[in-house]
Amino acid sequence: MRQRTGTGGRVRRAATAAAALLAATSLAAGCGDDDAQDTPAASSPVPSASPSANPKSTLLAAVPDEEDPAFRFSGSDPTGVVTGVVDPAGKGMDLTLTEKDEKLGFTMKLSFRLIEQRSWMKVSFDGADELSSMLKLPKKWMELDHAKLTDPASVPYYEGADPGNAGAILRAAGDTVTDQGGGTYTGTVDLTHGEHVRQAVADALDVDALGPAAKQVPFTAVVGADGNLTSLTLEIPAAGKNKATKYVVRYFDFGKAPKITAPTGSQAQKAPASAYELLNG
């Protein structure tokens, strides 16, 4: 895994900037409710055979890398849910964050298509279709010029085949990994163990707020019969005013997901000024 802070984290920061602008404007006044939500896709891994001699190495080998075919992923944590497709061969990724504003009564879907250092964005509003025209946002893919962003790093680009940072997290498991059989592995991770793992969860968790508990966060990982990591779940303990929660990454449909291609022709255009206003807040 070579993510710095995680592609999902970048999408959430972009969504936060967009949501801040929407909340500050009167354009959303009177928008109706919409209870539609994207549900993260789940997979049904086939249990693997007998326990492995080196369970940690087995887990790390199962983490997606640049040699894998295109696959789907989903990730959820206290900040929301991200879903998408990763195409390692094409160095591309599609991902969508769905965020509902309970006060204003609409759901924003912020999608990105990434191919190497190029980024396209698409925004839609369920329950408030008029917002797209009122905000002067086209419904097609908008290619972004990172030089026009207040913080270019806040918008994602392709950084590798492990958007959920599973590799960085599992490397912080030390010698605690236990093979439970049937493709299931358990153990604990030390989220304070170096900047790599801290950055992996920085956008989702306040490691310092967890106190001593951050050094032994329980996890469960599942590897399918095809040798691919199917899921990684961290059981985040309660800390201060924060309730206990989970950090979940799922990888599935290896070889079945579509390849990522650049949107062309009538599918795309250069991002207008309104798109940068939305992202820059």
Image: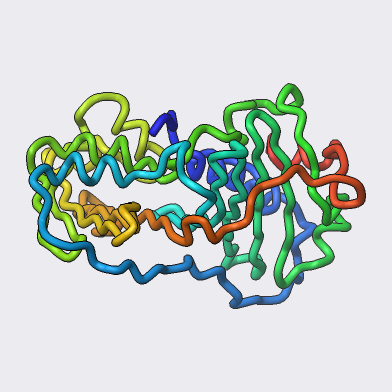
Q: Position of residue 208 (x, y in %)?
A: 24, 35
Does 98 sit left or right of 172 as displayed?
Answer: right
The tally of labels here is 0
Q: Position of residue 8 (x, y in %)?
A: 50, 45
Q: Position of residue 213 (x, y in %)?
A: 13, 44
Does 249 sit left or right of 265 as displayed?
Answer: left
Q: Residue at image x 31%, y 53%?
A: 227
The answer to whether 254 is drawn above or below residue 33 in the figure is above
The answer to whether 131 is drawn above or below residue 168 in the figure is below
Q: Residue at image x 75%, y 65%?
A: 29
Q: Nearer the viewer, residue 246 or 231?
A: 231
Instruction: Locate the N terminus by quadrant.
Output: top left
Q: Position of residue 168 (x, y in %)?
A: 31, 35
Does 124 sit left or right of 170 as displayed?
Answer: right
Q: Residue at image x 62%, y 39%?
A: 90
Instruction: Locate the C terminus by quadrant.
Output: top right
Q: Quadrant of residue 145?
A: top right
